[in-house]
Image (cartoon, rainbow, N blue to C red):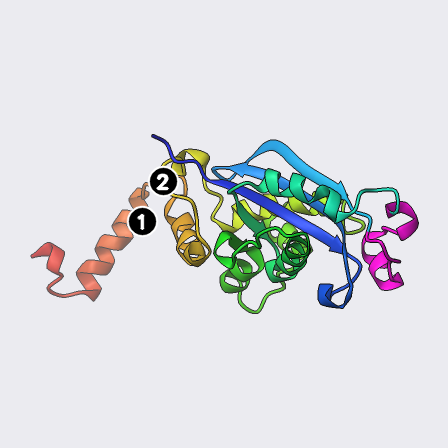
């Protein structure tokens, strides 16, 4: 039986940095991958934070409280999010930030928190793969040729879609046929998968560069005049 890897690549937007101090989620966007390929199934939800959105946060994502106030609260969408994720692996860029908010909100509504073992942090992968380089989402899109021209502001669903493309590139641009029999990835297997991507590149036949008669003659002259007791002529 073929093992399928189901992953949820997601992103969040918030009112700030500290859920324990009252900051809230305002948007969640997610893309479903099966065997590292998008299925076309997505999740997108704006969330009423039940508080004003600070100017600094608004400048990042452009979502004001006046716009968000008519959307459901996290309490109202929590079950839908949990159902969408199911038993999938969660993939995020700077995952500690997103998971901090997701788990804080889930815990507040009486849901089980997601363990870190179910999380893949693409920022962690990128830092190990490209030490010393800029590894934010825009920089990685540029590195891998992923078109992010529509990204004028942070948006959770668009960022999740871009990250899904970047994630595949971080894993070595693997072909789906090479992944059909793999077991689901765990957080501590990330380094192994990055390395494995290099092994799974497409086979390219050796290219033939025939020597000219002049080159052959020059080579023979070099051997006869410059080398003595050449092993291959013994």
Q: Residue at x 69, y 47 (%)?
A: 159
- The dot on residue 207 is 2
* Quadrant assignment, res 209: top left
Q: Position of residue 137 (x, y in %)?
A: 66, 55
Question: Does residue 161 appear in this view?
Answer: no
Between 190 and 184, the one nearer to me in the picture: 184
Q: Residue at x 44, y 52 (%)?
A: 186
Residues drawn in magenta: 49-68
In the depicted structure, whether residue 135 falls above or below residue 11: below
Q: Position of residue 187 (x, y in %)?
A: 46, 56
* Quadrant assignment, res 203: top left
Does residue 186 appear to the left or right of 52 in the view shown? left
Disc 1 marks which residue? 215
User: Image quadrant for the N terminus?
Assistant: top left
Between 125 and 131, the one nearer to me in the picture: 125
Count numbered badges in the picture.
2
Residue 107 lies in magenta, yes or no? no
Q: Position of residue 20 (x, y in %)?
A: 72, 66
Residue 62 lies in magenta, yes or no? yes
Question: What SS does tag 2 mark?
Answer: loop
């Amino acid at each position: 039986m073929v093992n399928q890897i189901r992953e949820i690549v997601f992103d969040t937007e918030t009112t700030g940095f500290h859920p324990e101090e009252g900051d809230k989620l305002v948007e969640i966007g997610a893309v479903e991958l099966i065997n590292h390929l998008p299925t076309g199934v997505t999740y997108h939800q704006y969330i009423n934070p039940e508080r004003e959105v600070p100017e600094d946060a608004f400048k990042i994502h452009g979502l004001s409280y006046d716009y968000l106030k008519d959307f459901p609260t996290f309490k109202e969408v929590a079950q839908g999010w949990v159902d969408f994720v199911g038993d999938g692996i969660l993939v995020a860029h700077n995952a500690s930030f997103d998971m901090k908010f997701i788990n804080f909100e889930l815990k507040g509504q009486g849901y089980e928190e997601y363990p870190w073992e179910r999380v893949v942090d693409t920022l962690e992968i990128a830092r190990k793969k490209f030490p010393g380089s800029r590894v934010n989402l825009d920089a990685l899109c540029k590195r891998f040729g992923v078109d992010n021209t529509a990204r004028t502001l942070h948006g959770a669903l668009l960022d999740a879609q871009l990250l899904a493309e970047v994630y595949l590139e971080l894993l070595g641009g693997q072909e789906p046929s090479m992944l059909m029999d793999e077991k689901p990835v765990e957080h501590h297997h990330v380094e192994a998968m990055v390395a494995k991507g290099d092994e799974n590149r497409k086979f390219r036949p050796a290219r033939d560069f025939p020597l000219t008669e002049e080159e052959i003659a020059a080579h023979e002259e070099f051997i006869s005049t410059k080398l003595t007791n050449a092993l291959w002529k013994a």
